[in-house]
Image (tube, rainbow, N blue to C red):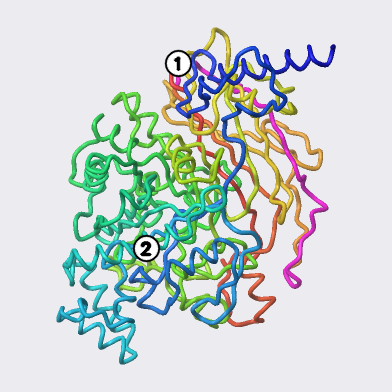
């Protein structure tokens, strides 16, 4: 009888939590955490305590930015793997890469977005099959004949010139639609709700004056809504506002849902987070609201460098100097110092606070993810399994793999050398999504509400909740997530209406990649708008491995390194597998806007260059700045505080 009474009491408490699982007063969470009221039988005990749980309870791993042979800048330079191959590889199958090496992931991904460039989508495939519709075009026949004669790079140059001039060499809607539908059909074949999700998407490739303003477009919808679209392209417009109008029209005409994710901005020469629109106007409230609506996320890390911050912008951040791509744009112009604050995530988040105070809306309010931007059809992010940016620089391609220029191929107009070579590439990154189900709808909804985080390729699990009354004991609670949602907000959400005398409290957990390295530390990165001093930032170490104490907000010493470059080995004798942290803002002023995000660092491990050297030997004399040892990391979406 006692057990029965206890079970009824437990169920009542559980149901009470489920029915009232919403943030405390003064906190906002837009996720759908409720349950179907008609499915609840009040007063009737049920054995399973999990029947009505609906909060996101697991991390799903994926790549939202992968190119296949259907991207002209992949298929025209040797990538023979189409969308089907990309999905098979992401689901864990062994695939032979275009350059000949066999490849497989250590563990399958949970989801994938094949984000092929919309400009002349599928051109290489059309050439390969000698498509009759393509051959009706004089330009199409010209590049077809060049490729068939073995002049791939000449043909690619012909296309590149048209792309740069924004002159569609085919201008054939039916051809574009048919190639898009092939990609849609591939996603439908490989999409398996609950097991593997293939989201529909493409990349809009705005390269205004050689500045990278690219966005990946991701749909929540299935083939019934996205089939027969003509993806928006660089030929249709280079201004992000043009893209937003296209997205709005899609939602209106198809009753669908769609969002866009900008690239990391380090090749934008200050345009990614500029203080003016592309047509020269000052930012307005309308602009800020539309940007935050259509672009809730930012791709903070990928192959072409890391975009969290820069050592010039964050001189007190000992970990800021991480795979910088800061020499210029795609090649025409070098970098100027005043461009940097308008290219990096941390500074954009801070400037967003300033705009919010001025305009009443924040144009730079985004969550953070990582993805690859690989053009090999292979979503590889582990250092010992890195297949590179593109087919000509896959493993085994010799010195070209390291010294091939990724940017700066075209001579600059200002006499600078903005070239970045492949040895400077980062084996990054992954999108981590807190979700309940592995479905298009659940994943997209999590992206929209920004309950996501970025890693540089590792699969560490990171979770944070912010509130006003968390305590240190909450970090070790077995019901960490339930308590977090009931009493606070997750990453990507907002805190407001501060209770008298309170300051924001964060509870954080981080668990190492099960196939990777131990953790070094957990950090809180705070940015705020100081009424006297303007925009400010500070980094607080809140958990240090190996029993290190925290002195004045920092781990008392570095974690050390066990890396042996010659054997490309390291040991988990240092660091911790699990770290948890409680932090209360010691500098909080309720009148000042602020944001908080979590950065977690692993212990040092070998880079992909070190693994290449061990496997292939001395294939190239690498420059002095070649990275042989690095620390993988994760960045969560922020939690914002608004007075």
Callout 2 environment at 10 Å: few (<14), some (14 to 19), or many (20+)? many
Residue drawn at (20%, 61%) of the image: 235
For mark 2, give the secondary structure.
helix
For mark 1, give the secondary structure.
loop
Q: Which mark is residue 591?
A: 1
Image x and y of residue 401, in percent: 52, 77
User: Where, quadrant-wise, is the N terminus in this rendering?
Assistant: top right
Label 1 vs 2, first from the N-terminus = 2
Q: Which residues, given as a range, are shown in magenta? A: 565-592
Above or below — where is 16 with respect to 224? Answer: above
Residue 488 is drawn in which quadrant?
Answer: top right
Pointer 2 residue: 183
Image x and y of residue 566, in percent: 74, 72
Callout 1 environment at 10 Å: few (<14), some (14 to 19), or many (20+)? few
Above or below — where is 414 with respect to 615? Answer: above
Q: Main secondary structure of the magenta part?
A: loop
């Amino acid at each position: 009888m006692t057990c029965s009474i206890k079970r009824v009491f437990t169920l009542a408490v559980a149901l009470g939590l489920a029915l009232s699982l919403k943030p405390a007063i003064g906190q906002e969470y837009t996720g759908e955490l409720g349950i179907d009221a008609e499915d609840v039988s009040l007063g009737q005990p049920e054995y399973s305590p999990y029947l009505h749980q609906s909060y996101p309870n697991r991390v799903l791993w994926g790549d939202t930015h992968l190119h296949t042979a259907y991207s002209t800048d992949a298929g025209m330079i040797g990538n023979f793997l189409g969308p089907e191959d990309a999905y098979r590889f992401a689901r864990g199958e062994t695939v032979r890469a275009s350059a000949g090496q066999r490849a497989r992931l250590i563990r399958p991904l949970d989801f994938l977005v094949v984000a092929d460039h919309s400009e002349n989508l599928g051109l290489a495939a059309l050439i390969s099959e000698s498509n009759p519709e393509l051959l009706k075009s004089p330009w199409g026949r010209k590049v077809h004949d060049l490729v068939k004669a073995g002049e791939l790079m000449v043909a690619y140059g012909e296309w590149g010139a048209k792309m740069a001039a924004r002159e569609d060499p085919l201008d054939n809607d039916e051809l574009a639609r048919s190639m898009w539908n092939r990609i849609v059909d591939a996603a439908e074949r490989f999409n398996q709700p609950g097991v593997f999700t293939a989201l529909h998407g493409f990349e809009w490739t705005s390269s205004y004056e050689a500045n990278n303003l690219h966005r990946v477009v991701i749909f929540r919808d299935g083939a019934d809504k996205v089939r027969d679209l003509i993806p928006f392209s660089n030929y249709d417009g280079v201004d992000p506002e043009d893209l937003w109008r296209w997205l709005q029209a899609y939602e209106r005409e198809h009753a669908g849902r769609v969002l866009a994710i900008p690239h990391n901005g380090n090749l934008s020469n200050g345009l990614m987070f500029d203080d003016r629109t592309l047509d020269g106007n000052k930012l307005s409230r309308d602009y800020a609201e539309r940007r935050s609506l259509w672009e809730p996320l930012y791709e903070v890390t990928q192959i072409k460098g890391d975009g969290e911050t820069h050592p010039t912008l964050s001189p007190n951040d000992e970990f800021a100097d991480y795979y910088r791509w800061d020499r210029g744009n795609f090649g025409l112009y070098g970098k100027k110092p005043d461009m940097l604050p308008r290219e990096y995530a941390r500074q954009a988040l801070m400037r967003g606070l300033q705009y919010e105070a001025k305009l009443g809306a924040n144009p730079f309010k985004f969550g953070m993810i990582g993805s690859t931007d690989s053009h090999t059809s292979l979503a590889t992010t582990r250092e010992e399994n890195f297949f590179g940016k593109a087919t000509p620089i896959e493993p085994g391609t010799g010195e070209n793999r390291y010294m091939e220029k990724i940017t700066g191929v075209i001579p600059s107009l200002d006499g600078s050398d903005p070239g970045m070579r492949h040895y400077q590439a980062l084996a990054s990154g992954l999108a981590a999504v807190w979700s309940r189900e592995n479905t298009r709808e659940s994943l997209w909804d999590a992206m929209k509400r920004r309950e996501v985080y970025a890693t540089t390729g590792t699969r560490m699990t990171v979770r944070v909740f912010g509130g006003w009354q968390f305590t240190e004991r909450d970090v070790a609670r077995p019901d960490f997530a339930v308590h977090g949602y009931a009493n606070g907000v997750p990453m990507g959400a907002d805190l407001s209406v501060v209770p008298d005398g309170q300051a924001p409290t964060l509870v954080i957990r981080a668990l190492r990649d099960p196939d990777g390295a131990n953790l070094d530390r957990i950090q809180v990165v705070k940015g705020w708008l100081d009424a006297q001093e303007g925009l400010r930032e500070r980094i607080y170490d809140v958990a240090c491995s190996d029993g290190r104490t925290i002195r004045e907000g920092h781990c008392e010493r570095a974690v050390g390194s066990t890396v042996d470059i010659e054997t490309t080995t390291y040991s988990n004798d240092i660091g911790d597998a699990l770290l948890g942290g409680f932090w209360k803002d010691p500098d909080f002023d309720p009148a000042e806007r602020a944001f908080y995000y979590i950065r977690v660092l692993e212990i040092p491990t070998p880079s992909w260059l070190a693994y290449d050297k061990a496997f292939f030997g001395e294939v190239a004399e690498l420059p002095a700045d070649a990275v042989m040892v690095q620390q993988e990391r994760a960045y969560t979406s922020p939690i914002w505080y608004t007075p």
